[in-house]
């Protein structure tokens, strides 16, 4: 009888403790993440850059702060160079698009008329009916409240967007400085982790997050980079003048949960077929297959069972993270899950050994 009561008490304690852990983790990330994200990002970069910093510090007679400053500055310059190059290419393509806007619109309108004529033939309508219908719909939107609604939205959201951009730049500057300090003092953190009264809890969370960063996020970054290169190359093959810009956007969309490259490539392939560009449609379908298998092979080969998270669970975690945290939930969701899982397993081990 006593054993059953004890078993029930353990299960109840684990259940209540798990609920408390989940609530606390979600609350901390929901409320505090906005204020501490530069420091969390700085610490992650400091951990990732430890090997080159330690190696350079040995050459500089253990001047770790100087070594950290040099390594972080070099890495930052490399990242900025890549971003500036991609941004320059994207800006140049955007400038060409704006300069040839009227020509592009007229060309698109002509292609759209051709598609509408084909639709008329497929559904047995008089030639020109579909195009006239879409023109009336466009007229209702433009002549009605469409323009006024557009400018209202722009006025409403322009100031928050500018404020967000300024805060993001300031946060990145703080992150840069924080990375140098965190990298120089990483040994103090390790000493604290080993001597704190919460060393078991901190150790459990540390191992979970270390696996997440070294496996999941690193693999996702590699996959995104590969798919950006593959997509940009394919778009150049079909003669798209905005290949670089579209390749980067497609790679970023592929990195987002649920969407994938099919969100862009499949509708584009269907549209190419409707416009009569069969070659382009075939290239886009092949591109989708290639990017799909790149993701599947990389995730299975590089991640495998090292994450300890089933694909279905990861999908649920990311989806819930987006609902709770917003757009950044596809990053914060897995982080929250790893922390919750580590603490719940630690609580379970305490209960199993009757330490609570």
Image (cartoon, rainbow, N blue to C red):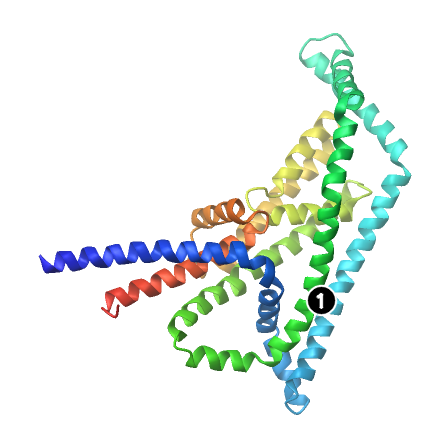
Residue at disc 1, secondary structure = helix
Please name the residue shown 21% across and 57% down the image.
9
Residue 222 in the image, given as x and y percentages of width and height: 61, 58
Q: Residue furthest bottom?
A: 61
* Res 241 quadrant in image: top right
The foreground one among 210 and 273 is 210
State the residue in front, 39 or 309.
Answer: 39
The N terminus is located in which quarter?
A: bottom left
Query: Of residues 70 and 180, which is closer to you in this image?
Result: 180
- Out of 82 and 149, give the one closest to the viewer: 149
**Residue shown at the point (57%, 72%) measured from the top left:** 47
Horizontal placement of 3 versus 128: left or right? left
Query: What residue is rendered at 76% in x and 69% in y?
Result: 77
From the viewer's perspective, tell me whether residue 211 is left or right of residue 182: left
Image quarter hosting the C terminus: bottom left
Query: Number of labelled discs?
Result: 1
Residue labelled with disc 1: 173
Question: Residue 186 lies in what quarter of the image?
Answer: bottom right
- Residue 312 on image: x %, y %: 44, 46
Is residue 266 shown above or below 217? Answer: above
């Amino acid at each position: 009888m006593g054993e059953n009561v004890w078993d029930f008490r353990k299960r109840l304690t684990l259940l209540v403790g798990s609920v408390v852990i989940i609530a606390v983790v979600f609350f901390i990330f929901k409320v505090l993440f906005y204020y501490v994200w530069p420091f969390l990002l700085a610490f992650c970069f400091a951990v990732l850059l430890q090997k080159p910093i330690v190696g350079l510090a040995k050459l500089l007679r253990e001047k770790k702060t100087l070594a950290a400053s040099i390594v972080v500055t070099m890495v930052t310059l490399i990242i900025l160079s890549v971003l500036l190059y991609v941004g320059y290419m994207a800006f140049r393509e955007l400038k060409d698009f704006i300069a040839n806007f009227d020509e592009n619109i007229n060309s698109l309108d002509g292609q759209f008329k051709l598609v509408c004529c084909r639709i008329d033939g497929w559904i047995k309508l008089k030639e020109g009916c579909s195009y006239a219908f879409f023109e009336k719909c466009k007229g209702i939107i433009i002549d009605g409240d469409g323009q006024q609604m557009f400018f209202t939205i722009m006025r409403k959201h322009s100031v928050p967007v500018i404020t967000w951009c300024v805060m993001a730049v300031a946060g990145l500057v703080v992150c840069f400085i924080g990375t140098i300090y965190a990298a120089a003092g990483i040994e103090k953190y390790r000493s604290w982790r080993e001597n704190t009264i919460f060393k078991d809890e901190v150790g459990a969370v540390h191992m979970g997050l270390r696996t997440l960063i070294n496996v999941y996020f690193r693999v996702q970054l590699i996959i995104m980079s590969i798919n950006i290169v593959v997509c940009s190359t394919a778009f150049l093959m079909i003669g798209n003048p905005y290949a670089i810009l579209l390749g980067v956007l497609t790679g970023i969309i592929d990195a987002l949960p649920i969407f994938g490259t099919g969100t862009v490539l499949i509708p584009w392939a269907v549209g190419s077929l409707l416009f009569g560009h069969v070659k382009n449609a075939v290239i886009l379908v092949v591109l989708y297959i290639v990017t799909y298998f790149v993701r599947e092979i990389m995730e299975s080969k590089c991640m495998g069972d090292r994450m300890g998270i089933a694909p279905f669970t990861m999908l649920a975690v990311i989806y819930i993270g987006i609902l709770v945290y917003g757009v950044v939930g596809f990053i914060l969701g897995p982080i929250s899950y790893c922390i919750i899982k580590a603490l719940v397993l630690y609580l379970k081990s305490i209960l199993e050994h009757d330490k609570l």
